[in-house]
Amino acid sequence: MELEPIMTSSVNAEQSLTSSIAAAEVPANLAALTRADFPLLSQTACLGQPLIYMDHAATSQKPLPVLEALLHYYDHDNANVHRGAHQLSARATEGFERARQKVADFISAYSSQEIVFTRNASEAINLVARSWGDANLREGDEVLLTLMEHHSNLVPWQMLASRTGCVLRHVGLTDSGELDLNDFQHQLSERTRLVSMVHLSNVLGCINPISEVTALAHDLGALVLVDACQSLPHMPINVTQLGCDFLVGSSHKLCGPTGMGFLWGREELLEAMPPFLGGGEMIQDVYLEHSSWADLPYKFEAGTPAIGEAIGMGVALDYLQQLGLDRIQAWEHQLKLQLFDRLQTIDGLKILGPSPQQQPDRAVLAAFTVDGLHPNDIGALLDSEGICIRSGHHCTQPLHRHYEIPGSARASLSFTNTPEEVDRFSDELISTIGFLRQNS
């Protein structure tokens, strides 16, 4: 039986969320249900081979409703938000603020006022470091990070330490490549003012026990920031249940446009924080000598925002929620087991991070090394066969130094991938390894 795509084209993408999912059970094969919504995935690559995209941890592909939402904004509603008295501005503002509410609903925030739009998650972390960090941290205060952090969750704190004299500490890993909770408890102290930690590692694939981390940190008066970029597209996130104080996300990993992200923060914290950037939109009153600031969240949103991108992100969240994050998890779990079953049989291949047997809910990605081979050579040859994976340090140079390797190859999947793609990737990887070994 042929499955209908999850979305159908329409003039207004925000109103096109009627599909087979609304009327029926989602079938087990989510890839078959959704592939028609992602035109990029239907193209052929070199030598007429079908394109296989396995770099979702770097950026996700965009479904038709998101593309339509961007076009609809620029075709019908293009105007600045909050400022104009005319109907175009009113419609643009309505769509922009509706997207903010969708983000709040997606993570179960208390209020849309707690959602600050940024260009990406990196800017969101920098906002906290510059605003909260500069105002609250002094010499001798400690920020607790981990060895598995993305550069976006390392560099802003290094810059903060150089400005304030605060001390950075880094929690280690277990032998299986998971957060060492004993080391976390050992390093956590009354000097710790902030814990900043990834929820799901983009290399190790492990999921960190954020609820436990926040409970321990709060007992000693420390705040907790969560980098949820990798976890948000793959599982339900509830900031109340996590118990954290800040959480950041990025649209382009959520099937949404690039150049758009968000910061969630507890309202009382955001209220007390000074603005990060100055300019239009973030002010209440401006005089020649001084200014007063707008209410939340606008005091952190200086200048004209990425309006179309925000609207597109809201539609992407609609898409994921209609598909169902629990269903996404279930389909990706099947792919993960198949992927690991295939990779674990390849001689000389080592996967970084815990196996599904060690951590059943780990991510559907595998960063790996192959004895004697450079990951860039593996990635380049697979690309010549139309298979897109990642190779390099994945913005986690300290983690790769910890393992004493220059980089790794990484296949990261999503609900649009198929079992047939996993098999073809595995077969081509075996062939690639054989070729490289013969010619090394």
Image (cartoon, rainbow, N blue to C red):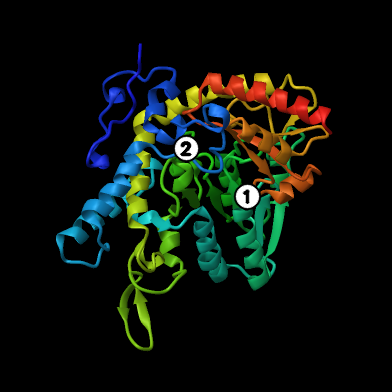
Q: Residue at x 49, y 45 (%)?
A: 243
Residue plotted at (62% across, 25% down): 425
Nearer to us in this view, 303 or 71: 71
Above or below for 174 versus 158:
above
Q: Position of residue 95 (x, y in %)?
A: 26, 51
* Vertical side of 438 occupied by 68: above or below: below
The image shows a total of numbered marks equal to 2
- Image quadrant for the N terminus? top left
Q: Residue at x 77, y 39 (%)?
A: 374
Type of the residue with mark 2: Pro
Residue 181 in which image quadrant: top right
Do residues under tags 2 and 1 come within 8 Å of each other at their CB atoms? no
Please tell me the numbered disc located at residue 400. Answer: none
Q: Amino acid at mark 1?
A: His
Measure the C-alpha gap from mark 2 to mark 1.
17 Å
**Residue ID for mark 2:** 233
Percent position (x, y) of residue 83?
24, 67
User: Which one is in front, 253 or 124?
Assistant: 253
374 sits to left or right of 254: right
Q: Residue furthest top?
A: 1
Q: Residues within 10 Å of mark 1 (few under 14, many from 20)?
A: many
Q: Which residue is tagged 1?
A: 150
Residue 272 seen from this side: yes
Q: From this view, report whether residue 127 is shown above or below residue 146.
A: below
* Residue 418 percent location from the top left of the image: 51, 22
Q: Is residue 417 left or right of residue 76?
A: right
* Picture quarter with the C terminus: top right
Q: Residue furthest bottom?
A: 289
- Residue 171 makes an appearance in the image: no
Residue at left offset 38%, top offset 23%: 33
Q: In terms of secondary structure, where does tag 2 sit? A: loop
Q: Secondary structure at mark 1?
A: loop
